[in-house]
Amino acid sequence: MRPSASTASLEDAATALAPLRRVRVDLVDLRYAPIVRDAKGNRAPKRVIHGCTTSFLPGTVSALMGPSGSGKTSLLTVIAGFVDQSHVSGNLLVNGERTQVRKRLVGIVFQDDMMLPALTAFETVKFAADLRMPRRCSDAERTEACDAILNELGLAHVRDQLVGGAARRGVSGGERKRLAVGVELVTRPALLLMDEPTSGLDAAAALSLMRTLRTLASRGQTVVAAIHQPRTTVFDSFDHLVLMSKGHALYDGAPDGCVGHLESLGLGLTLPPRTNPADWLMDVIAADESLGEDTRKLPEGWKNAKTQKEKRVFVVGDSDAPGTDGAAGKRDDDDDEGASVWRQLRVLTVREDKSRRGQNLTAINASQMLVMAILTAMFWWQMPDDTDAFVMERFSILFFCIIAQSNAVVFACVNTFAKERQLMIRENAKGMYHPLPFFIAKTASDTVNTLVMPCLYATVTYWCVGLKRTAEAYFVFITAFALCILVAQSLGLALSCAIPDVQVSLIVAPMVILMLMILGGFYVTFSNMPVFIRWLSWCSQARFGFTAMVVNEFSGRTFQCDPNGNHARYGTGCPVRGEDVITALEMDDLSVGQCLLALALMQVGLRIAAYVAMVVNFTRLKQ
Ligand SMILES: Nc1ncnc2c1ncn2[C@@H]1O[C@H](COP(=O)(O)OP(=O)(O)OP(=O)(O)O)[C@@H](O)[C@H]1O
């Protein structure tokens, strides 16, 4: 890569896309049996790959083809090292060495490519480059490489267009697939694995993508694509075909030899004229699968085939594999890992912020805040501060502020994290970053973005309804409110991280927050709560936030008695002392400072709990 020049030339593209080294992968009787749970909850290994022996060579495009459930995706994830290795047996050889492919040398594109819809095509590739390119690369070199990649993949015209998604139209399906390839190319991987690269694309887009894969292979990349039922043109563009069914290999060799092999088995199989071979192969496999596992003919047919016996299997220790750099040919670039932890933190913080582009300060959010503020102001407008008739109203508006915003924040947090976590799991498995910088970046972004609208609402409400009119009281109120909102959000995040099922966390989180609200002391005073549950109020952020606000609002004040009112609840004296109100509400056991400290500790504790749950649940190697 050359350090200067802003426009990516063809030469730049060639360099940016050429793999760092050439890698040959040999599978020798590779088996994969993950532990699965049945309906009764019993755990047992499930044989997903039954013994696969094949070779993937640099400079070639190989296809793993087979019906749904044949094990194509599983084989790709096993090769990429994305599965629990204790469930894998047999040999996986990389340039003759029994080892896993180094993460920096492999790029994997999943069927459901996950990208952040609010980023542009260039930003998507650039963030990947910032996280994955060698540390010594300058920013200019990264930008140059990204432009070269976009040019090469035919994406220059959508460089500054948003990726988009279901809610917002962005790049087309074909462009999206190519962009997913581009994200992987930033590390110049030797081995590119793709799951269903052409699914959802029309004939022209599918062929164009295949041409791109061929170009990559021509530069020395080893390309392996799992594909279900390709069109004839796509089928013809492969160099190598592995036909699979229910974890068994049915054929392995040149694509044009596959039909001949099946026809030669003596099963009366013949490709009808003017038929797409891929369609016919799927029909033949479906018929064979319907015979049942013990009476199937095709797996046995391949085991006994002459071509199978003649296949040269690469052996352990043979590091002079033809067409590779050999195990000894390891290059310095291999050792240059991606971004440092500080760089990861910086890049992820910027990405987190950009990925929320258009989400926080939208017209809808602002309108929602305005409507809520108008409604609140209407009901509690400018309460007189010298009569006890409005003591109850002061009390209720404080709690309403907490409850109105906490629920919305928790729900938004669970929803947002549900979308982010799959991407995080994938990127973490690819070794793009450590979970800690991701979590810190998320916490920083959450803190800023979550508070803007609720604090605006609380500020407008505070002055409209006529709460204590001093700057100091407002400052305490907004601090208690902000901490309360942040703790509620952290609780939502901790629950999302602890409960891997999104649907369950969407049900549990609002229930927990409602429970904590009831424990806040507004609806039921603490002494009237059932003893067995009263202690839980010490875990309620609403209790601390509400107590801080009540003490802040009422201390040091006196209220004249309304002649028609019943002030007995707040003490016998008249005028009513604010301290008597606090005592009557059973909120005299904690000071404002203690409440704020408790909220701050809860915030730190919940974030730590969320991080631990995230690491335990989401950053293990699993897809
Ligand atoms: N971790 C796992 N736990 C349970 N079952 C698994 C696991 N991994 C794979 N399988 C099972 O292995 C079989 C093969 O799945 P795989 O996704 O590899 O098939 P595929 O050929 O890629 O299918 P498709 O074309 O539909 O994507 C399926 O029955 C799947 O349920």
Image: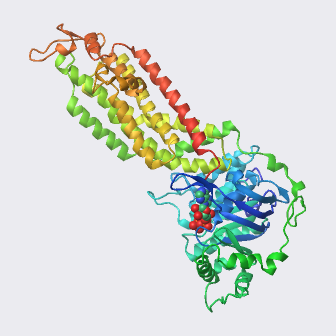
Q: Is residue 386 visible?
A: no
State ligand 1's quadrant.
bottom right
Residue in the picture at 22% in, 19% down: 391
Q: Nearer the viewer, residue 291 or 445?
A: 291
Q: Position of residue 175 (x, y in %)?
A: 57, 64
Q: Position of residue 442 (x, y in %)?
A: 54, 39
455 with respect to 88 (left or right): left
The quarter of the displayed image where residue 264 is located: bottom right
Residue in the picture at 69% in, 48% down: 132
509 with respect to 469 (left or right): right
Q: Position of residue 328 (x, y in %)?
A: 90, 54
Q: Nearer the viewer, residue 400 or 311?
A: 311
Q: Is residue 611 above or below residue 89?
A: above
Residue in the picture at 70% in, 87% down: 263
451 with respect to 293 (left or right): left
479 with respect to 39 (left or right): left
